[in-house]
Image (cartoon, coloured by chain):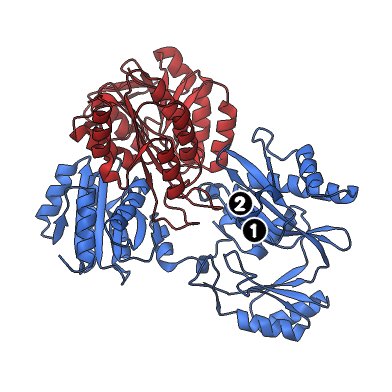
Chain colours: A red, B blue
């Protein structure tokens, strides 16, 4: 088992006919993801095909039509920032419960409103500004290089795309597979938080251990630490990026900033350590520390 | 994006918020004329730079005559203001001459995103004039918080009244003025896509009126595309030249003090690369994320940027290709090496999508590259190279 997505997930890609959408949809299809529909307003009725003509996917004008015609139950969004909030709301309105938004650069207030609008609806959206979600060897909804993942029993949640790859790559190299890998993204208002992802992994009987990758800014890691302290018996290996980041400077991600004396790496590491997590000094240690943690618990 | 106080006050004025009368000037002569025109016994001369803590740094001074205003303006304009937020200093190109105000009481008003609740939050304190960080540390109970519900799109009157009574306002006229100010700020926050609005201090005058003595607005960079008028307010003289160059290429670059230049894809990995260099005893010279859609030209520009910093003794390129394919990065490195003289050791670690093509391209390029097998290996080699040990 896994969380969020599996081999039965039927994906609609919003923005399928765009450059990024086309490129990554092809990669997802190569990985084995069931992409059943695309949505591009005005291009309904077309059939999208990759350059080699290996795949063909019907394109619809609206998500509502796509869901009705194909039974899509998850949406992967590649539309440009000005249209992203609209795209998320359209997917939610069409009854889709798992939405993954890759788009980077969405105005913060757009996501503030989306988050408020989707409160209590049961819609789980991941992102934006994220690499997506992958359940290895079953379903890839995102832009991550599929070959570095391997099916297994470790869940990964991360704010950073490339650090997600780094962690998965190290685990895979040690023969440790992953149940599901969730890139929650680097924005200040993420759809899914560290705590929510940890909670999903904690409740998943086929996830044995969790890798949590955080960074400076906000208090998501502290909230996750609080949850871990109270509820999680599974081993948690954590890494927090940005020990050397100066306060008040935004480090690439819109959400990666130490401000108002809040959000520095050390206090996050401290909170996680106190919650019983194995905290790594550099991301290069993640694989090694996880292997040790699994062995200590007799899980490997 | 940041703007100057005088620009923020113009926006405040458009929204009907009370601000002191003031005139922006660029030289001593204009300053003298402005002070005369304002005609108050005291005027305030305020340096216009993009930094907080101006008062303590000597960027806000009182003048008791137009001549004195001219003298102060002459000293300020053309100099650099060094503040605790910006030790290197920022150039003062203009000053704001403002009428003196009879201050009775000062308040702090701030509005920004609360990341815990994903809603904008007002922070108000009767301890005005101080830095909010300081109040938060020493007297957190003095900060009154109230969230703006995004579904309502503005702070409701009852919420503003709650704050007003908590900070000790009783006079009905003043309470109403205060409610109006907070409600206006909350609308402005959404309409202009601000990321921070701050009035420090909001002043109650001896004549029993509120006036925004200071004004600060930061804007969400992601939303600037829908605010062309705000974009026009950008003052690039307040930005580090290297960071400005990086911005032109849509690169995320932050200058630091060390001597190992870093070029990384992904903000998280870029931070982690800095941390790893530090962990192995080195000092990173910068944060640089080449981003998700790096073209050969952009990578080449990033490379030139690193080489333009004379402090940089070695360069560590750390790439894990997801969206950015390794062949593109390799192409960028080769292209940049053709355009600039590669006079410093270059350590490259490539992993991810199209890694084999990327590695082969670098190998066949004839460039003098020190390959690294993983991130830790690369960081250690970069630290050694910066010390001249390899």
Q: Is residue B108 left or right of residue B321?
A: right
N-term mark: 1 or 2: 2
Query: Residue at the spot x=58%, y=74% of the render?
Result: B92
Residue A145 visible in image: no
| Marker disc for residue A131 | none
Q: Nearer the viewer, residue B83 or B46?
A: B83
Quadrant occupied by the C terminus of chain B: bottom left
| Marker disc for residue B196 | 2
In percent of width and height, residue B255 lies at: 39, 63
> Would you place residue B255 above or below residue B250 in this image?
below
In percent of width and height, residue B229 lies at: 60, 55
What residue did someone put label 1 on? B216
Q: Nearer the viewer, residue B380 or A118?
A: B380
In which quadrant of the rendered view does residue B51 lie?
bottom right
> Would you place residue A295 above or below residue B278 in this image?
above
In which quadrant of the rendered view does residue B334 lie?
bottom left
In percent of width and height, residue B282 lies at: 28, 61
> Would you place residue A140 above or below residue B192 in this image?
above
Chain letter belonging to callout 1: B
Query: Residue at the spot x=49%, y=34% of the render?
Result: A226
Query: Residue at the spot x=62%, y=42% of the render?
Result: B120
Measured Cα–Cα span from mark 1 to mark 2: 8 Å
Label 2 crowding class (10 Å Cα cut-off): few <14, some 14-19, many 20+? some
Say whether mark 2 and mark 1 are on the same chain: yes
Chain letter belonging to callout 2: B
Secondary structure of the residue carrying tag 2 is strand
Residue B223 visible in image: yes
Query: Are the two marked residues, 1 and 2, in contact with CB atoms closer than 8 angstroms?
Result: yes
> How many marks do you count on the picture?
2
> Would you place residue B13 above or below residue B148 in this image?
below
């Amino acid at each position: 088992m896994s969380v969020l997505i599996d081999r039965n997930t039927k994906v609609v890609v919003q923005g399928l006919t765009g450059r990024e959408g086309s490129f990554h949809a092809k990669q997802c299809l190569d990985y084995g993801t069931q992409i059943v529909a695309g949505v591009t307003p005005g291009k309904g009725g077309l059939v999208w095909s990759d350059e080699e003509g290996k795949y063909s996917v019907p394109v619809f004008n609206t998500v509502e039509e796509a869901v009705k015609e194909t039974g899509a139950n998850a949406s992967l969004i590649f539309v440009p920032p000005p249209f992203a909030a609209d795209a998320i709301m359209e997917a939610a309105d069409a009854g889709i419960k798992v939405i993954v938004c890759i788009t980077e650069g969405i105005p913060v207030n757009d996501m503030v409103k989306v988050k408020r609008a989707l409160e209590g609806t049961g819609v789980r959206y991941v992102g934006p500004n994220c690499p997506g979600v992958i359940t290895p060897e079953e379903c890839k909804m995102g832009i991550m290089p599929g070959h570095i993942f391997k099916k297994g029993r470790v869940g990964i949640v991360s704010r950073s795309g490339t650090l997600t790859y780094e962690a998965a790559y190290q685990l895979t190299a040690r023969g440790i597979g992953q149940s599901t890998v969730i890139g929650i993204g680097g924005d200040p208002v993420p759809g899914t938080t560290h705590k929510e992802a940890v909670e999903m992994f904690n409740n998943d009987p086929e996830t044995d251990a969790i890798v949590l990758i955080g960074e400076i800014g906000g208090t998501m890691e502290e909230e996750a630490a609080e949850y871990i302290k109270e509820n999680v018996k599974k081993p948690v290996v954590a890494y927090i990026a940005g020990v050397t980041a100066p306060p008040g400077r935004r480090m690439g991600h819109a959400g990666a900033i130490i401000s108002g004396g809040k959000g520095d790496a050390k206090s996050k590491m401290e909170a996680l350590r106190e919650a019983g997590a194995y905290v790594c000094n550099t991301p290069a240690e993640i694989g090694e520390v996880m292997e040790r943690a699994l062995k200590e618990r007799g899980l490997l | 994006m940041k703007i100057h106080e005088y620009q923020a006050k113009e926006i405040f004025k458009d929204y009907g918020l009370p601000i002191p009368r003031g005139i922006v000037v660029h030289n001593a002569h204009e300053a003298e004329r402005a002070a005369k025109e304002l005609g108050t016994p005291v005027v305030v001369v305020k340096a216009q730079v993009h930094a907080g803590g101006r008062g303590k740094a000597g960027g806000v001074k009182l003048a008791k005559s137009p001549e004195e205003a001219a003298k102060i303006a002459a000293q300020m304009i053309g100099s650099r203001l060094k503040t605790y937020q910006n030790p290197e200093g920022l150039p003062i190109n203009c000053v704001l001459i403002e009428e003196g105000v009879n201050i009775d009481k000062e308040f702090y008003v701030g509005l920004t995103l609360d990341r815990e609740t994903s809603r904008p939050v007002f922070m108000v304190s009767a301890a005005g004039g101080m830095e909010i960080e300081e109040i938060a540390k020493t007297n957190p109970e003095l900060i009154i918080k109230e969230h703006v519900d995004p579904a309502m799109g503005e702070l409701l009157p009852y919420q503003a009244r709650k704050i007003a009574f908590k900070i000790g306002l009783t006079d009905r006229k003043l309470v109403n003025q205060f409610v109006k100010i907070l409600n206006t700020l909350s609308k402005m926050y959404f309409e202009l896509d601000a990321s921070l609005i701050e009035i420090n201090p909001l002043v109650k005058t001896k004549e029993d009126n509120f006036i925004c003595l200071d004004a600060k607005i930061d804007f969400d960079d992601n939303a600037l595309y829908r605010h062309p008028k705000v974009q026009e307010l950008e003052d690039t003289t307040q930005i580090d030249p290297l960071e400005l160059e990086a911005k032109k290429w849509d690169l995320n670059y932050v200058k630091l003090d060390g001597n190992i230049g870093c070029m990384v894809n992904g903000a998280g990995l870029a931070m982690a690369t800095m941390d790893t260099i530090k962990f192995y005893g080195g000092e990173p010279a910068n944060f640089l994320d080449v981003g998700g859609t790096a073209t050969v030209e952009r990578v080449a520009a990033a490379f030139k940027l690193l080489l333009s910093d004379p402090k940089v003794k070695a360069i560590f390129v750390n790439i894990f290709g997801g969206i950015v394919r390794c062949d593109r990065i390799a192409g960028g490195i080769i292209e940049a090496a053709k355009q600039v003289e590669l006079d410093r050791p270059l350590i490259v670690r490539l992993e991810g999508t199209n890694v084999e093509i990327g590695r082969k391209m670098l190998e066949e390029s004839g460039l003098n590259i020190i390959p690294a097998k993983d991130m830790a290996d690369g960081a250690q080699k970069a630290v050694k190279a910066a010390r001249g040990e390899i």
